[in-house]
Structure formats: C-alpha cells, structure tokens
Amino acid sequence: MSISIENLTKRYGALTVVHGISFTVAKGEFMSLLGPSGCGKTTTLRCIAGLEDADGGVIRIGEGIVSAPEQGVVVPVHERQIGMVFQSYAIWPHMTVAGNVGFPLAIRKVSAADVEKQVDEALEIVGMRHLRERHPSQLSGGQQQRVALARAIVGRPQVLLFDEPLSNLDAKLREGTRAEIKRLQRELDVATVYVTHDQEEALSMSDRVIVMDGGRITQAGVPKELYRRPANRFVADFVGRASFIDIMRVNGAGWATTGGTKLRLDDAGAPPAERYQAMLRPESVDICGGSASAQADDAVNVLHGHVVESHYLGAYTEYHVEASGSRVKVHSRDDFDVGTEVTLRFAPEFCRLVALSGEAR
C-alpha cells in the first residue's frame, strides 16, 4: 500500500505546526522526514499513525481515506494497518519479549495460536526468537530496539512508521541497526516513513528525503540530489557539512567573490532570489601549501588563504581556511599548521549556487 498526504494541516490552539504539506510514499519506498527539532516532522508522522488528529487535509493509506477532518473521517489507530517504532521503544517492562511483540495482535482479538505463530515469525526475522521469554530489564538497548522492530512488523503491516528510533543507541549500534531496518523494510516491501534529525541516517537509508523547516517542506528529492544540489542555504547547511562564500554578479553575467576573485559554479535550477552564496562541500576541495602559483582556468577554481583552525578526526583533518573573506572547510589527510598559507582548488560542478534561506521568491 502507498501513503498519500494532501494539504495536511495541524494546529495547537492558535499555533500552526504543519502548514498544508503534501507528499506521497509509494509501496516499497523508504521516505525520510528530515529536519531540526520543532519542524513538524514527528507531528506529521503522528497524524499518519492516528496518534494526532489533523485539522485539515486528507491522509490515505492505500486507496482508503484514514483522515479527512473536513469530511468527518477519522479511522482509529488500530484499523490503519500500520507498524510503528517509537523513539523510547515503548516496551512494557512487566511483559516478556513475546508478550510485548504479540500485544498489537492481542488487542485485535487474534487467536492465541495465531499470535504464537506470528510472534515467532517476527522474532525470527529480527534474530530474537531465543530470547522470547526474557523481560526488557534483561535486554541490552540494542535488543530492546529489536523487540520494538519485531512488534512493528508482527502481523505484516501495510505501512511502517519510525519516529527517531536510533537516537538512544550508541554510534556503533546505530550503524548496524540502520542496516537491519533497511533489510527488514526491503523484505516486507512496504511504504515506510522514517523521522530523523540525523542527516547521515536519512541519506544512507532513504529512497527519497523530505527536508522540513517551520512546518513546511523546504525540498524533497533523492539523497544525492539534496546533497549535491540543495535549493537554498537551509537545506545545504542542514544536509551535511558545507561552507558558504559570499558572491556577487559580474557585469550581469558570471560570479565573483566579494574580494573580486571570479568563480565558475553550478547555477542550474537555482530559484530566483535577492541574494546568493556559493556552497562547497569539504570533501570536494583540494588543499595544498603555498599561495602564489596556481591560477584559475575553465576546469578549476582557485582561492588563496591561510589555515585558521585544525580539527583532527582520524580518517582526515578538517581545516578551516580564511579565503576571500569567507571560511572554507576542507577535509584532507595532509598536515598543515594553523597560519599556513594555502591554495584551495575545486571544480565548478562542486561549487553550487544557493539562495539565502527566506529570500527565494
């Protein structure tokens, strides 16, 4: 089944937290809602689940309408054929693993024999069948998360919803659980909406990503599109590491830094705006010592500057370089001291024109 959202609106009193957003999630598609705290992503998810009542718009799961307040339609949570994993796991401490996983089936009045069979199937999928009689207090955080996953998929739901399910796990465990969630979703072949504020999770797991800010959709697309061609500074800054260079038009055509250095960049599809900046990703910039020899040509842009900060991160060092009145982040395996004069080189296709947030028309 697919998920379809049309003009979804949600208010709390006089405050509107979701402003008429629309999107669809196809059967088998993994869609992430990405954005900072308070952007409306979790509220949107809870409206799909039926845990919040929408104030406007239409929500469909498959061909059926599950929410249409103007038409007086509100389908209860247990009739929406969804599986949901919460940030807090929401596991009952007094129940065994099997009891927790089978709870959604029990409240639907499924027979005891069928509950037993479906619980075993779900626990087998997540590799937890041998722990079915344990209580949550006897499980690690990762095992509790797997119990929550098994409960979400028991009974083979038509839609999966995830509300920041990995935020309580450590970095290593998050990486493995990401792969596990993706494997399960592919195996079940269901429409999935995944809420996160972690851009790495969204980029690595999703078929498409919706970036939200202030209850509105700022940009939607496949992960590579959002990362390489963000529509504005907000998306560029939120989706990955980025540097921004103040630029201006040169005689009505072409671009230059405020210091007068000409830049060749990717400006295809940039929205009309009063002001723009050039965006660079740190892995797309080459850095070398010296500042006088290299010159720009049609294939490469060149900026001269000096190192003002250095942060060793193991696989690489992140340098902050003061160049043309801006700070440019660069990832490199080479060693440079703070104060070193350096030259930065980057191809035009990796230098993206972005509209300043709030100024696109």
Image (tube, rainbow, N blue to C red):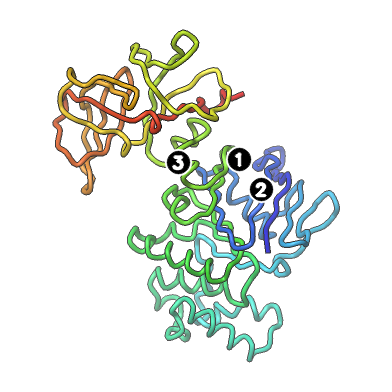
Q: Earlier in the sequence, mark 2 or mark 3?
A: 2
- Residue at left offset 59%, top offset 63%: 28
Would residue 62 be visible to someone looking at this image?
A: yes
Residue under circle 3? 227
* Left or right of residue 319, residue 138 in this image: right
Identity of the amino acid at label 1?
Ile
Q: Are marks 1 and 2 in contact (CB under 8 Å)?
A: yes
- Element under disc 3: helix
* Left or right of residue 169, residue 3 in this image: right
Q: Determine whether 61 is above or below 326 in the image.
A: below
Identity of the amino acid at label 3?
Tyr
Identify the mark at residue 23; answer none if there is no mark: 2
Would residue 51 be visible to someone looking at this image?
A: no
Separation (CA) of disc 3 from disc 1: 16 Å
Separation (CA) of disc 1 from disc 2: 9 Å
Q: Quadrant of the N terminus?
A: bottom right
Q: Determine whether 16 is above or below 337 in the image.
A: below
Q: Determine whether 29 is above or below 236 in the image.
A: below
Identity of the amino acid at label 2?
Phe
Q: How would you rate the neighbour count of disc 2 (Cα within 10 Å): few for under 14, some for 14-19, many for 20 or more?
A: some
- Element under disc 2: strand
Residue under circle 1? 217
- Residue at left offset 59%, top offset 83%: 118
- Element under disc 1: strand
Residue mark closest to the camera, 1 vs 2: 2
Residue, far top: 251
- Residue at left offset 16%, top offset 38%: 334
Q: Quadrant of the C terminus?
A: top right
Residue 2 in percent (x, y) is at 67, 60
